[in-house]
Amino acid sequence: MNNHFAKGLRVLVLALAACLMLSGAALAQEETSATVSGQVTDSTGAVVAGATVVITNRETRTERRVQTNDDGLYVVTPLVPGTYEVVVEQPGFKRYLQTDLVLNAKDRRPVNIVLEAGNVSEVVTVTSEQNVVQDSPTGQTLISGTQVIELPLNNRDYLKLTELVPGVSSSLDDETTFGLTSRADISINGMRRNAVNYLVDGVTNTDPGSNITLLSTPTVDSIKEFKVLTSNYTAEIG
């Protein structure tokens, strides 16, 4: 991964009708994390209960391990954005391995798994393909790390990249986010500029007084990616 991503901040920009007050670290973490869920079945379609599902971050080798319930269902969350491997094991079935599962901020990715009968020492490897179906009803646009570091930015202001998102308009001048004012003057889908909430790694970054001033300004070099959510928010957003 590019050295520019060493610290890997994830920024989330929300068009909200009111400022959200976050009540705990767990909720804050879920604001920008990803979720993987699905069902494990056999080749006949019967559910496989008690199967072990292991999801491993390929960069950090951090591992999350869960078991399917009586209906063969599983959920793994929160997961930081990154590339993952998915392994499923159950006695009497071949070991399932899915590589290169890419998760971005706020993704809700369905991964349904079909196990083949056989010895667990045998491995069925699946290479992930680009997900072309939106996995959430939320209107959202991802600004990738490649865009963050490669697109020209006046004064290296990452908020200029929000103008790439449909429905976003801005009166940002050349001095935005400089000095003590650090205002973020954008409108999403015609809403007032103070109806936008900004989260950095899941923690609100908006001054509750004016609701247009950022409490801190992430540098371009510290941002891995950010996502703009514009409508149909999930329950944890509000």
Image (cartoon, rainbow, N blue to C red):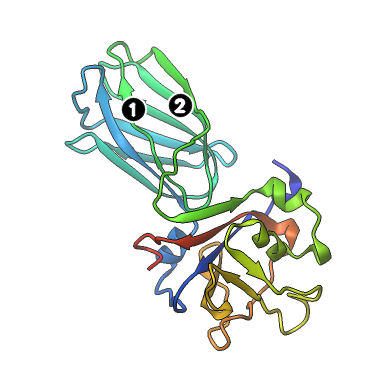
Residue placed most toward the observer, 16 or 225:
16
Q: Earlier in the sequence, mark 2 or mark 1?
A: 2
Q: Which residue is the extreme one toward the bottom? A: 209
Residue drawn 31% across the image and 32% down it: 52
Q: In this rendering, is residue 190 above or below 115?
A: below
Residue placed most toward the observer, 92 or 189:
189
Density class for disc 2 (Cα within 10 Å; few <14, some 14-19, many ≥20) is some
> Do the residues bearing badges 2 and 1 touch, measured as CB atoms within 8 Å?
yes
Residue type, label 2: Gln
Residue 134 percent across, percent down from the top left: 44, 43
Residue type, label 1: Ile
Q: Which residue is mark 1?
A: 113
Residue 35 percent across, percent down from the top left: 41, 47
What label sits on residue 98 in the rendered view?
2
Residue drawn 41% across the image and 16% down it: 124
Residue 96 percent across, percent down from the top left: 39, 22
Residue drawn 32% across the image and 11% down it: 119
Q: In this rendering, is residue 152 above or below 97?
A: below
The quadrant the N terminus occupies is top right
What label sits on residue 184 in the rendered view?
none
The quadrant the C terminus occupies is bottom left
